[in-house]
Amino acid sequence: MIDVKNYAFLGQRSQEKKIENLKKENYSRIYAHEAAHKNAAGSLGGPIVIEYSPQGIPIGGHVNIRIPALNRENPDETISQAKQIKRAALAPVTDLSDADLNVARQAETLLSEAESYKKDQSKSGETLDLIG
């Protein structure tokens, strides 16, 4: 008969191995998600930040994406950037967070604002021929 008390360290090793596997799996999953954001964001994206629990287990992450103000001098640039931001926010396709969806909504709002401004600017340049 084996005295289990003498082998308690086996249970501890098993637990430590599970934690290490969890760390690796979480890190890989979170990093891949955030890398998709960063790659799609291009120059508008900041660095990948991984957040950890007090036990050192990766629990989340983020990439800051710069959302510019409407460029009234060049609304086409704003339109292009808004589309890029929306693609970046939705890039991972699966497992989107509320923050991801919020950034996509902000980009959509900026896109609408820039398109509307561009349309209004093109109207203000029209001339009317009056007959009479």
Image (cartoon, grey):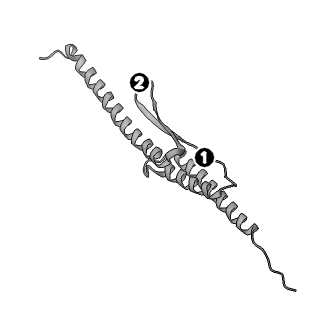
Residue 112 appears at what percent x and percent y?
64, 59
User: 10 Å neighbourhood of mark 1: few (<14), some, or many (≥20)?
Assistant: some
Q: What element does badge 2 sit on?
A: loop
Q: Residue at x 22, y 20 (%)?
A: 10
Identify the image quadrant of the N terminus.
top left
Residue 94 appears at what percent x and percent y?
42, 50
Q: Residue at x 40, y 39 (%)?
A: 31
Q: Amino acid at mark 1?
A: Ile
Q: Amino acid at mark 2?
A: Gln
Q: Residue at x 75, y 72 (%)?
A: 126
Residue 77 seen in this snapshot: yes
The residue beneath circle 1 is 67
Marks counted in the figure total 2
- Which quadrant would residue 58 be assigned to in this image? top left
> In front here: 15 or 3?
15
Q: Is residue 58 left or right of residue 119?
A: left
Judged by depth in the image, the label closer to the viewer, 1 or 2, is: 1
Q: Is residue 101 left or right of residue 24?
A: right
Badge number at residue 46: none
Residue 9 appears at what percent x and percent y?
24, 17
Q: Is residue 108 left or right of residue 7?
A: right
The residue beneath circle 2 is 55
Residue 34 appears at what percent x and percent y?
45, 42
User: Which residue of the protein is positioned furthest toward the left in this rendering?
Assistant: 1
